[in-house]
Amino acid sequence: MAEPTAQRIWDAALGQLQIHVTRPNYDTWLKNTTGIRFDSSTFVVGVPTEFVREWLSTRMGSLVSRTVGAIIGQPLEVTYEIVGTNSHNSANGHNGAGMPLSNGHAAQAVISRPQIPVQLNPRNTFNNFVVADGNRIAAAAAACAAEEPGKDYNPLFIYSTPGLGKTHLLQAIALKAAQRGHNPLYVTSEQFTNDFVTAIAQGRADEFRRRYRSVQLLLVDDVQFFAGKNRTQEEFFYTFNDLHSAGCQLVVAGDRPPPSLNGLESRLCSRFQWGLIADIQPPDEETRLAILMSKAAILDVTLPTDVARILAARATDNVRELEGLLNRVVAFARLTASKLSPALAERALTALTPIPAPCDDPQAITTSVATYFNVSVQALTGKSRAKPIAEARHVAMFLLREDADLALKQIGLILGHRDHSTIIHGINKITRLLVTDPELSVHIADIRSGLAR
């Protein structure tokens, strides 16, 4: 059973991780995870399979640990625990969106280890895609491809810089086509490559080709990653020809137009130009605000306009980053049981950024703590036990130990010749409170940010 506080912290972490990893990696490795529990030194994340646990531990462990530590306000270890499989790994040959992987040929027939099929995000529908001048042609063409596959725009090539909605449109096509009784298959170029390499190694090339050539729509994301993979490009070239000649719909997404795709064979780029090439431009402010309101409605959150403007100003050319900022602010508001406001948004965005390099100047630390808590340095080092002064003093002890790496005796001398047991008590008190008191995490993050400037 997941602890609610752990889940809220993990929601905030996922919001930040969305910005730092590619959408395919996020959807494959992070999206189906949960925050289970945590203590002063360890945070436990629930994962669906051993394969996901292995990948996160070896490939993303450092990034995840830094992100969670920044949210809680102290370094800690992140471990992974299997909590059970989810629906898209079941044996019924369907992925997470309830769509057939192919005409009865399950992906597991091609791969030896428990590979994770690309799961469609049920939120990536046409209704949830905000249409504006910068993406209108791409959205209209995508809708036509879903309604009448193979008729008007075949192939359809969609390109843009990362984070502007290519994946959303491809998955919206797949979801809509499935609703209309068609047989779509959405994959990333990485999964296509992995499936092909493993199929060749196991002598199952025929099964691989049946899977990829028995669909009515094939949607391939991030095609630029085929660059340099000559055998994969050749296989995709023949798959493309086979499907196109049969009147099946092909939709491909990349980060630049076909003529500019370095490392891809010219004959493949030529095929991409047979149909329609549509780009997606960065959204203007009005569109960014509309996107935020749409995302907030999905999260069942009322987003004040002044908060939306703060977020829109922070991410001007990346919708994925915009969504990540919204997730961070919403998670922070829920974590602290606070209402969404401009002040809270600013604090959340500050608190959830990576921890700045620690300041090791003891005088700067004590002065910054005193200023932040509106007490004098003399009071901080004096004998007063008034609650506001004592709390500020404990924070100073913690930062002098953690950031300046001072010995207990040195900290005691700086803070009024206090003995080491008093210093240990103050440091331990802050360490415990950081686990349960998100407001304290904000205070310490604010102080560290001020010291870093």
Image (tube, rainbow, N blue to C red):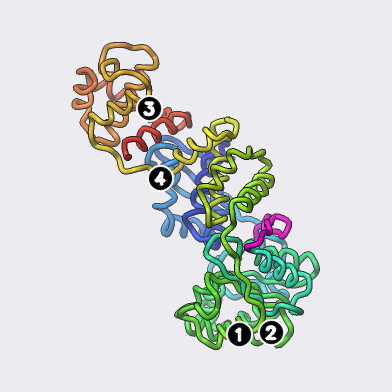
Please report contact status of discs 1 and 2: CB closer than 8 Å, yes or no.
yes
Residue 265 location in percent, x, y? 50, 85
Rendered residue at 70%/60% (across/down): 97
User: What residue did someone put label 3 on?
Assistant: 430
- In front: 414, or 50? 414
Secondary structure found at label 4: loop
Q: Which residues are magenta?
A: 120-134
Q: Amino acid at mark 2?
A: His
Q: Residues within 10 Å of mark 3 (few under 14, many from 20)?
A: many
Could you tell me which secondary element the residue under label 3 belongs to?
A: helix
Give the secondary structure at mark 2. helix
Residue position marked by numbered label 4 in the rendering: 354
Task: Residue type at mark 4: give it.
Answer: Pro
Q: Nearer the viewer, residue 197 or 237?
A: 237
Q: Is residue 331 left or right of residue 389?
A: right
Q: Residue at 54% of width from left, 49% of height from top?
A: 324
Read off the residue under disc 2.
244
Q: Quadrant of residue 58?
A: bottom left
Left or right? Give the position of 347 relative to 389. Answer: right
Quarter containing the C terminus = top left
Q: In terms of image quadrants, where is residue 268?
A: bottom right
Q: Earlier in the sequence, mark 4 or mark 3?
A: 4
The answer to whether residue 290 is above or below residue 348 is below
Q: Which mark is residue 271?
A: 1
Count of marks overlaid on the render: 4
